[in-house]
């Protein structure tokens, strides 16, 4: 057998997926970050109509259809405090995952550093390694937000980029508007790229989501977003990246060779989701907030500490030794915090993207597990 690249040997299967795949068929799965709501019907119908008309049969432009990119620009103007995005400066991608990949691949040279939140989404470290870069973890504050001062202090001559994720996976934390303004300033002052992962930007319960792109004085911010979480379209694999013309042109060079274009039927579905009625999003967010409050009350009653998640659909409590294994052994899937970085040790990520009845059943199991390990 021939050997493997050193880059691929530095990454492994996601800890989230390992737990998910190991779970029994009857387990209650609070491990996967996937909304339990259907894709809005008008988005589904748009894809069906496109397929029937033959519009989903062929390649689209590398960047995606003009109509979808215009819908993305309109979305940012509507949802992000009139953020001005040029449709020409958008690439439709195979989910937010590909958007992150091409953003890092296009901007990071071998040996260069990427600052990532710790704990943070599993892809940041892996994609940095696959680009030949060096991930540098930035420990989070007590409320699980990332401190701009810590980011600035970690920047070195080798730093190419830093990643901001708000609302965040795995913590549910939402950065303040002041923080986002400061991240943009840091990118400008230090001449490094800020990659802003805003996939959960519409799922906010408390506070306000603002993009650092709105505050940037230069072109040193790119935004990654997707339909996956907001419109419950994880399986459609439709995301995008936006930035300056020069940055989009470089990311397009990577995109055209690894993807060519995003799925054409998914592009029509995404266009309809973005431009059609937003009631399904509002209803989903209201349901997630109710579930969050139930979960927080239950965890507090067990004596577990957890910073209040102000967005997304995750909670990350501090848990006793052995708690995660005990919960999983009793039939509830949660993800150990160390799957998201060294500073995640002693925590667990719980997804509350499930119905209230199932969530209450799961918390009873957690209560029994907590008593067993104390």
Image (cartoon, helix red, strand yellow):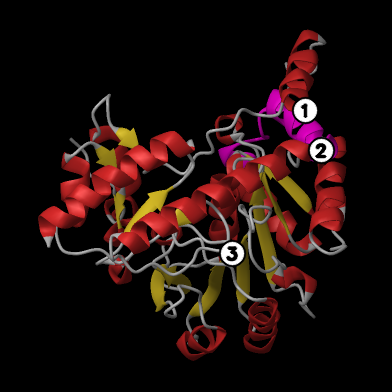
Numbered tag placed on residue 166 in the rendering: 3
* Secondary structure found at label 3: loop
User: Whole-Å distance between the Cαs marked 2 and 3?
Assistant: 24 Å
Residue 13 can be seen in this image: no
Foreground residue, 341 or 304? 304
* Secondary structure found at label 1: helix
Residue in the image at 38% along x and 51% along y:
350
Asked whether the beta carbons under mark 3 and mark 1 sit within 8 Å of each other, the answer is no
Asked whether the beta carbons under mark 2 and mark 1 sit within 8 Å of each other, the answer is yes
Residue 123 is a magenta residue = no
Work out which residue is located at the far top of the displayed protein and give it. 52
Is residue 23 found left or right of 192 in the rendered image? Answer: left
Residue in the image at 69% along x and 41% along y:
283
Judge the density around disc 3: few (<14), some (14-19), many (≥20) Cα neighbours within 10 Å: many
Q: Which residue is mark 1?
A: 268
Residue in the image at 46% along x and 51% along y:
294
Q: Image quadrant for the C terminus?
A: bottom left
Above or below: residue 118 compared with residue 316:
below
* Secondary structure found at label 2: helix
User: Whole-Å distance between the Cαs marked 2 and 1?
Assistant: 7 Å
**x and y, in percent, of residue 297 in the image:** 42, 58
Numbered tag placed on residue 68 in the rendering: 2
Work out which residue is located at the far front of the displayed protein and give it. 301
Q: Bounds of the magenta span?
A: 256-278
């Amino acid at each position: 057998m021939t050997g493997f690249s050193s880059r691929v040997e530095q990454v492994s299967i996601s800890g989230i997926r390992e737990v998910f795949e190991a779970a029994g068929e009857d387990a209650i799965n609070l491990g996967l970050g996937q909304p339990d709501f259907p894709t809005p019907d008008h988005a589904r119908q748009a894809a069906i109509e496109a397929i029937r008309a033959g519009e989903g049969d062929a390649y689209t432009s590398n960047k995606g259809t003009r109509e979808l990119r215009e819908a993305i620009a309109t979305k940012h103007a509507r949802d992000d405090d009139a953020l001005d995005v040029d449709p020409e400066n958008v690439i439709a991608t195979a989910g937010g995952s590909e958007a992150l990949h091409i953003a890092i691949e296009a901007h990071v040279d071998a040996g260069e550093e990427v600052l990532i939140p710790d704990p943070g989404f599993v892809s940041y470290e892996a994609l940095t390694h696959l680009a030949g870069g060096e991930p540098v973890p930035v420990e989070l504050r007590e409320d699980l937000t990332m401190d701009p001062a810590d980011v600035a202090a970690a920047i070195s001559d080798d730093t190419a980029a830093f990643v901001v994720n708000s609302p965040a996976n795995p913590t549910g934390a939402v950065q303040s508007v002041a923080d986002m303004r400061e991240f943009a300033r840091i990118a400008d002052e230090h001449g490094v790229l800020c990659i802003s992962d805003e996939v959960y930007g519409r799922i906010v319960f408390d506070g306000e989501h603002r993009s650092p792109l709105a505050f940037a004085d230069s072109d040193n911010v790119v935004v990654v977003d997707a339909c996956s979480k907001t419109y419950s379209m994880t399986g459609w694999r439709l995301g995008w990246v936006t930035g300056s013309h020069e940055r989009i042109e470089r990311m397009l060079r990577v995109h055209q060779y690894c993807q060519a274009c995003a799925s054409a039927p998914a592009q029509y579905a995404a266009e309809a989701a973005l431009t059609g009625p937003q009631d399904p999003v509002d209803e989903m967010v209201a349901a997630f907030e109710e579930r969050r409050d139930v979960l927080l009350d239950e965890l507090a009653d067990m004596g577990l500490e957890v910073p209040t998640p102000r967005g997304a659909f995750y909670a990350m409590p501090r848990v006793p030794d052995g708690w995660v294994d005990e919960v999983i052994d009793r039939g509830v899937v949660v993800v150990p915090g160390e799957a998201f970085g060294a500073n995640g040790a002693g925590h667990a990520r719980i997804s509350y993207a499930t119905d209230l009845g199932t969530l209450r059943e799961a918390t009873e199991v957690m209560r029994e597990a907590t008593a067993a390990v104390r």
